[in-house]
Each structure stands twice: as C-alpha cells, then as structure tokens.
Amino acid sequence: MELRLRILLSFIAVVCVEPWKVSATCEFPAVFNFGDSNSDTGGLSAAFGQAGPPAGETYFHAPAGRYSDGRLIIDFIAESVGLPYLSAFLDALGSNFTHGANFATAGSTIRPPNATLSQSGFSPISLNVQWYEFHDFHRRSQIIRNRGGVFSQLMPKEEYFSRALYTFDIGQNDLTYGYFSNKSTDQVRDYVPDVLGQFKTVVKDIYDQGGRSFWIHNTGPVGCLPYVMDRVPITAGQVDKYGCADPFNEVAKFFNVKLKETVQKLRQELPEAAITYVDVYSVKYTLITKAEKFGKSCFRYYLIYNSNVKVKFMWISQNILS
Ligand SMILES: *[C@@H]1O[C@H](CO)[C@@H](O)[C@H](O)[C@H]1NC(C)=O
Ligand SMILES: *[C@@H]1O[C@H](CO)[C@@H](O)[C@H](O)[C@H]1NC(C)=O
Ligand SMILES: *[C@@H]1O[C@H](CO)[C@@H](O)[C@H](O)[C@H]1NC(C)=O
C-alpha cells in the first residue's frame, strides 16, 4: 500500500511531464484546494469549533483542524511539491497564504445543501461557496499584496494563480445527503449528473480565471463508512464480505464513472488545461479491505453496532501514509 500511495503521489509529477500544456519546469508555486473533510485543514474548525479527538493526535500532537489523527492526503501533496501545509481560508489566526489556500470544510457538498449545519450535519460551505471565497481571495489578496506592509507577506504572487495546482476532493457528501434525506439508491443515482454539472461549472470558472493544472480525486467507498451504515437501513444481504454496504459503494462507483466522463469532457473544452483524475476509491478500498496486510498497528478499530450489521470503523493513521 505504501507503494500505491507513493505511486499516487508520484502522479503529481506526471501532471508536469506533459510538456505541451503546463510549465516545463514542473514546479507548483501554490496549491489551492476545494473539498470536504477528506482535505479540510482547519476550515470547519475555524468556524464551528475544533474537530474532536483524535484530531491531530499522532502527528501534530494537538488539534490541527483535521478530521484525522495524522496528516491528510492534501498534506502529503503539499509536502511532495515542496510547499508548506495549506492554511484554511476561513482560519483568521496564524494563516499564511503565500503558497496557496484551502477552501475545503468538513461536511461540504458540491450542491448547496437545503438545510443548516445543525439541521443536517452538512457544511454551509458547499463548492459554490468555496468558489466565491476563491474568487474573492484572488482579487483581494492582490490588493493587499500591492498595498505592502505586514499582510502583503502572507499573500501569493499574482503569477502563482496560473501556475498553481488546483486540487479537488468533493462529492462524497452529495451522495450521503440524499440517503440522509431518505432518498433511495435510484433517486441518488438520478441526481448525480446534476451534481457533476455543478462541479464542472466550478472547474471551468477556475480555468477562466487562469487555472491550468487540476488534480481531481474521485470519491471513496462511502459504503464502508460506519456513520453511513449506522444511519441508513440496510439488510445483511447488502453487506459485502468486508463489512461494507454494497448499494452505497455501487452508487459511489457510478459517481466515479460519471466523474471520469466529466473530466474527459473538461479536457476537450479546456484545451490548455492538464487535468488528472485520481482513483482514490481503489486506494481506500484496498486500505480498508486488506488492513491486515498493512499492519494492524496502523489502524484503530471502532466497533459500532447497527441494527443488523457490525462495522469496522478505522481511522487511517498517519503511519500508513508516511
Ligand atoms: C509565510 O510563508 C512564507 C513561505 O513559507 C515565508 O517565507 C514567510 O516568511 C511567511 N510569512 C510570515 C509572516 O510568517
Ligand atoms: C434544494 O432544493 C431545490 C429546490 O427544490 C432543488 O432544486 C435542489 O436540488 C435541492 N438541493 C439539494 C442538495 O437537494
Ligand atoms: C427520514 O425518515 C425517518 C424515519 O421515517 C424520519 O424520522 C426522518 O425525519 C426522515 N428524514 C427526512 C429528512 O425526511
């Protein structure tokens, strides 16, 4: 697995080797990230209170705004391109945006949710809001930079916006949103094209603003997430041999097929862009289903009992990724 994750990260190099489109030197001076808890480095924590334990326990040794005890994939991406960890756009304290910003918040969807965080558990910072934030950030960071003084040292250079890597890890919550609103698997599948249409619009807007290098994660196996299995009724027959719920994983795979098609269309419509589609589903599913292979010490298991299934809940520790 270590190897696979290394391969995953080394794909970043591939973005740069395609010489026609992006800078020949293969250097990203900044990373701008959009997403949910998979890549939130402090956004939701800044606005709605720090993420609870084991947030930050094994690596940062203090709450670090992440819904993980260690580093997230986005942290490893930042490391692998030689940049500091991304500050959350919403975090007013100690943030430094010289080399990028993170607009992700835990619980974010692509489509705007129709309920508040307290009603639904979904973040109000959906992808369209993250885009407004980015747009505002782009414009105002340059005003601040040009003004000089102490804050100018915390802002990216204008040229970074076209040379940056734009990363996305979002969509998982759009699937659970439907299930939590009592929609059937078919109903969830039916709205996937609308979700991806909205995703596509945001990528195109960023391209129009100068973005050229895009790194897009597909969605993970939501059917292996205990909080999903705990909330949505499933029968024993719908659980695979690893304890994951088939219908939810099928819908995640459907989403990924459609996402891949969306990426292919974007490649045609945005001729100067280099867009990498990353199969995070396979990596996560392997981590979950072959946990023993990678050393039990790397995982913590939490057993949650739901009316008809026992599920393994594992936090992927930083150890497995480093
Ligand atoms: C912000 O980060 C950049 C790059 O890491 C660093 O050079 C700069 O000193 C930092 N600014 C402050 C005010 O810490
Ligand atoms: C919210 O409601 C509007 C109007 O009914 C609908 O078009 C939209 O798809 C809903 N959003 C979600 C996330 O369900
Ligand atoms: C979904 O169904 C459950 C059980 O019937 C109900 O308690 C809940 O309010 C429903 N949720 C929504 C969002 O309709």
Image (spheres, helix red, strand yellow):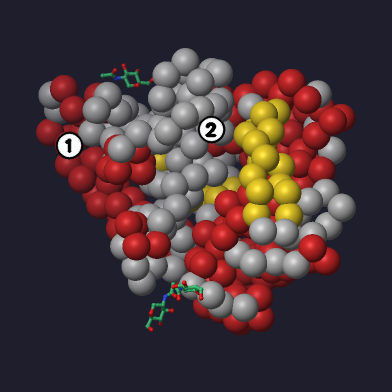
Can residue 164 be seen here? The reply is no
Classify mark 1: helix, strand or loop: helix
Residue 300 picture location, percent across and down: 67, 29
Residue drawn at (56%, 25%), measured in percent from left and top? 70
- Label 1 or label 2, whichever lies nearer to me, is 2
> Residue lying farthest top?
61
Label pair 1/2, CB-CB below 8 angstroms: no
Residue 203 picture location, percent across and down: 48, 61
Q: Which mark is residue 68?
A: 2
Q: Amino acid at mark 2?
A: Ser
Q: Quadrant of residue 11?
A: top right
Q: Amino acid at mark 1?
A: Ile
**Residue indicated by mark 1:** 144
Residue 100 picture location, percent across and down: 40, 36
- In the shown orientation, is residue 157 left or right of residue 288? left
- In the shown orientation, is residue 292 left or right of residue 192? right
Indicate which disc, 1 or 2, sits on the residue closer to the N terminus.
2
Q: Residues within 10 Å of mark 2 (few under 14, many from 20)?
A: many
- Where is the C terminus found, in terms of image quarters? top right
